[in-house]
Amino acid sequence: AAQAGAAYNFQVGFNTSSSFSFAPGDDGGLGALGDDDDEEELDILDLRAEQRRENASALSNIDELPVERDPEGLPDPMTSWEDAVQRKYISKDIHAKLLGAGLERPTLIQRHAVPIVCHEWG
């Protein structure tokens, strides 16, 4: 089972690897958008969402990359944001916000990491 502060490794593709660790309440240093954020930040977010939509086809090959997962017995990776909603990893509201931000599909690391975090922390 996953543990707080534990590291999980994924060997992805061609001699590259990604890893992550997590702890309860950790926001990864991202923080949250507050009421004082100005309109310029929102414009940047809209611009970034449009760039994501324009470049979505470049991610079409991620399903082809081989992935080795360690340790054994990890939850199955999610296949899409819709799958994450069905598995109750994210709400429909978050799903709509992800799509609105131009995030049409989870990245390869998100596909594997989100189920682990949600399995551990509910």
Image (cartoon, grey):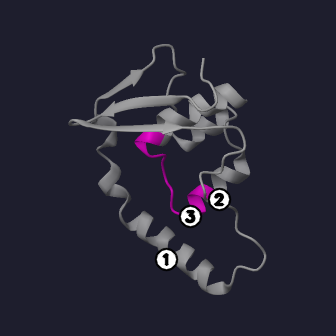
Q: Which residue is mark 2?
A: 97
What kind of element bears circle 3? Answer: loop
Tell me whether the residue at label 3 lies in contact with that at label 2, contact meaning CB atoms closer than 8 angstroms.
Answer: yes
**Residue 46 as seen in the image, left or right of residue 38:** left
Write down the quadrant of residue 4 in the picture.
top right
Give the residue number, with chain letter if any, for mark 1. 47
- Residue 79 visible? The answer is no
SS for dot 1: helix
Q: Name which residue type carries label 1.
A: Leu
Q: Which mark is residue 101?
A: 3
At x 51%, y 13%, the residue is 73
* Above or below 101: residue 40: below
Magenta residues span: 97-109
Residue occupying the far front of the picture: 5
Crowd rating for badge 2 (residues with CA inside 10 Å; few <14, some 14–19, many 20+): few
Going from the N terminus, do you reach mark 2 or mark 1 first? Answer: 1
Quadrant containing the C terminus is top right
Write the residue at 57% across / 57% down. Answer: 99
Can you see residue 92?
yes
Q: Magenta stretch: residue 100 in it?
A: yes
Looking at the rendered structure, the kind of residue marked 2 is Lys
Residue 51 sits in quarter: bottom left
Left or right of 8? Residue 59 is: left
User: CA gap, disc 1 to disc 3?
Assistant: 9 Å
Instruction: Give coordinates of residue 108: x percent, y percent.
Output: 41, 41
Residue 27 x/y as whole percent? 65, 51
